[in-house]
Image (cartoon, rainbow, N blue to C red):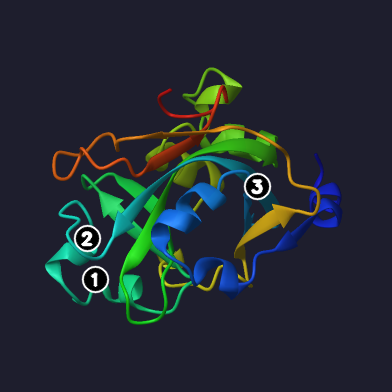
Amino acid sequence: MTHRQLISRTRRLKRAFFNRPTLDVAPDLLGKIIVQKLDGHVLAGKIVETEAYLGNGDRAAHSARGRTRSTEVIFGPPGHAYVYLCYGMYECLNLIAEPDGEAGCVLIRALEPLVGIKQIQQRRPNAKRLRDLASGPGKLTLALGVTRSRNGVDVTRGELTVRELREPAVFDIVQTTRIGISLSHDLPYRFYIKDNNFVSKP
């Protein structure tokens, strides 16, 4: 798919999409497309795996520690990006849900590359297969060049946006417990597209 084809077949998500309960937004983000404009190129991938993080009673959520300088964006208006450094090595992309003042975000766990694959491969030289380019939260930010400089940006406009197909594809969704965490790991807040080869872990 080319950039022009992507734009003609999709439209940007509006803020109302994100201004809903996190557990509704997380599965509904599957099949949506993240677009990043970077260094004169357009890079894009389809969201195939997400995890929801809530504000109340979710010990794994960054917002569980309350409103701080680093978590302020999570409590802010919906439709913004929350990008943080994980393990001091990898940046992770989250999208803010819930009304302004309420905490909730969705971690983007895996993408299926669609546009700018040549540039994505250059950014991920160690990935041997197409399916490995963005099959994890740290991989996908490297693939698209999403850094903490995007923290707090409005994803309904600008250089980093989320779009939806004008004619959405039909697929089944698998719901499981979250992975890669120790706190509240038993909560069934992970969602992915069934039988998709680009998810981080089936």
Q: Which residue is nearer to you in this view: 36 or 18? A: 18
Between the residue at mark 2 and the residue at mark 3, the CA separation in whole angstroms equals 27 Å
Q: Which mark is residue 70?
A: 1
Q: Which residue is nearer to you in this view: 136 or 17? A: 17
What residue sits 43% from the left and 29% below the top?
200
Q: Which mark is residue 44?
A: 3
Type of amino acid under label 2: His
- Label 2 sits on residue: 62
Left or right: 122, with 63 as reference point: right
Q: Which of marks 2 and 3 is nearer the N terminus?
A: 3
- In contact (CB < 8 Å): disc 2 and disc 1: yes
What residue sits 55% from the left and 47% below the top?
144
Position of residue 116 measured from the top left corner of the image (x, y, whole percent): 70, 42
Type of amino acid under label 3: Ala
What residue sits 14% from the left and 44% below the top?
183
- In contact (CB < 8 Å): disc 3 and disc 1: no
Tell me if residue 86 comes above or below residue 37 in the rendering: above
Type of amino acid under label 1: Ser
Q: Is residue 147 visible?
A: no
Position of residue 117 measured from the top left corner of the image (x, y, whole percent): 67, 35
Graded by Cα atoms within 10 Å as few (under 14), some (14 to 19) or many (20 or more), the crowding at tag 1 reads few
User: Residue lying farthest bottom?
Assistant: 101
Left or right: 191, with 63 as reference point: right
SS class, disc 3: strand
Q: Which of marks 2 and 1 is nearer the N terminus?
A: 2
Left or right: 53, with 34 as reference point: left
Position of residue 56 measured from the top left corner of the image (x, y, whole percent): 21, 65
